[in-house]
Image: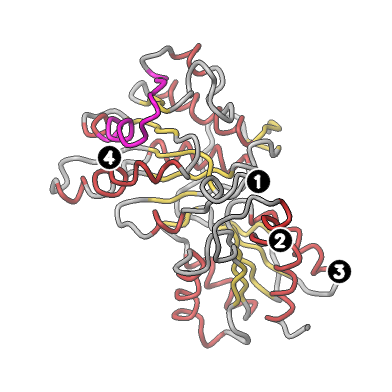
């Protein structure tokens, strides 16, 4: 095991896959000479050269379309968007080309492409640069959506995404890039579509993804002091979703709290509620509760921003309600 930052684990995954398969290449804004806006691509230009690490103009729709064409021609592009807030500009290519091409071509053209970059809230980046957009992409057939919460998962899932023959939307957390953790060295993959129980427990199931996993773990620690044993599950992949792991946990604990920083209406958590209601309704001893971002554009003001997203205390209070401890 090595101790790596989240960004270093992603870098290691790309480097290993570029060494393994010369069809893999990286393109995006400032990925080359600047080593990436968040230094995820550090050193890759020097090692692989400008034909495999391409600095692009500020034109998300254009270079994403280029990547779709490259994938149709047999290459395996990794597209980095500087932030998923900017991915909105490339949605047409991701949704109407990448996601649908295999179906529309009758199976003739797969799109082995990874569309990756930082997403979610950051620190005082305000309404246009601090959004959780994963629910948008989860809605689209043909796309896989992955959101790792730890350095080990970041490496293992990115390697799996690069090897996948389908377009994968790979959303990293903007505030986790400096997070350190143990990462297996050498060949190491995490299968897409498999959740992980980050903390076993018996009294309540807390489901959270990306950086909300760490909020849920902090809440679980506080709840333990109150005599509540919380199980924390990280789906890791939002589409395809490992519904079996979520449902089996709820059947054991009989309660569920879902945590996400996205907006509440039509959020990822709403889909999870639907699945649990359909498959584990008879096991529930309390309503399923959701802790989400507030249904407003993200404020710039630091204090208001703090109120806009889930924190440890809000999760603790939700678990108390679910277990009738209020």
Secondary element at image label 4:
loop
- Work out whether mark 3 precedes mark 2 in sequence or the reverse, and give the earlier one: 3
Q: Which residue is mark 4?
A: 111
Q: Which residue is mark 1?
A: 124
Residue 66 within the segment the image draws in magenta: yes
The figure's colour scheme reads: secondary structure
Where is residue 282 drawn, in percent x and y? 52, 88
Secondary element at image label 2:
loop
Q: Point out the frontmost of discs 3 and 2.
A: 2
- Work out whether mark 2 precedes mark 4 in sequence or the reverse, and give the earlier one: 4
How far is the residue under mark 2 from the one under mark 4? Answer: 38 Å
Quadrant of residue 229 within the rendered picture: bottom right
- Work out whether mark 4 precedes mark 3 in sequence or the reverse, and give the earlier one: 4
Q: Which residue is mark 3?
A: 225
Q: Point out the frontmost of discs 1 and 2.
A: 1
- The residue located at (39%, 46%) in the rendering is 88
Q: Which residue is mark 2?
A: 311
How far is the residue under mark 1 from the one under mark 2? Answer: 16 Å
């Amino acid at each position: 095991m090595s101790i790596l930052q989240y960004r270093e684990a992603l870098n290691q995954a790309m480097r290993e896959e570029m060494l393994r398969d010369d069809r893999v290449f990286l393109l995006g804004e400032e990925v080359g000479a600047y080593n990436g806006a968040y230094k995820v691509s550090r050193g890759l230009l020097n090692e692989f050269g400008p034909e495999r690490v391409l600095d692009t103009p500020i034109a998300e729709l254009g270079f994403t379309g280029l990547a779709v064409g490259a994938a149709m021609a047999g290459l395996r592009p990794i597209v980095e968007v500087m932030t998923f807030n900017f991915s909105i500009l490339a949605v047409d290519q991701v949704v109407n080309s990448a996601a649908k091409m295999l179906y529309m071509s009758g199976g003739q053209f797969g799109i082995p492409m990874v569309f990756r970059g930082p997403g979610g809230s950051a620190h005082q980046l305000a309404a246009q640069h601090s959004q959780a957009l994963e629910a948008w992409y989860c809605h689209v057939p043909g796309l896989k959506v992955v959101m790792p919460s730890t350095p080990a998962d970041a490496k293992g899932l990115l390697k799996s995404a690069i090897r996948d023959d389908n377009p994968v939307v790979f959303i990293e957390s903007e505030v986790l890039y400096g997070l350190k953790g143990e990462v297996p060295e050498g060949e190491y993959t995490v299968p897409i579509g498999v959740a992980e129980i980050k903390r076993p427990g018996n009294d309540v199931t807390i489901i959270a993804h990306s950086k909300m996993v760490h909020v849920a773990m902090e809440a679980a620690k506080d709840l333990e002091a109150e005599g509540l044993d919380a199980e924390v599950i990280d789906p890791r992949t939002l589409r395809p979703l490992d519904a079996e792991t979520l449902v089996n946990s709820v059947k054991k604990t009989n309660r569920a709290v879902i945590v996400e920083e996205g907006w509440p209406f039509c959020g990822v958590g709403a889909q999870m509620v639907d699945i649990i209601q359909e498959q584990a309704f008879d096991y529930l001893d309390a309503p399923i509760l959701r802790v989400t971002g507030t249904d407003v554009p993200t404020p710039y003001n630091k204090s208001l921003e703090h109120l806009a997203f889930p924190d440890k205390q809000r999760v603790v209070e939700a678990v108390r309600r679910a277990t009738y401890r209020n």
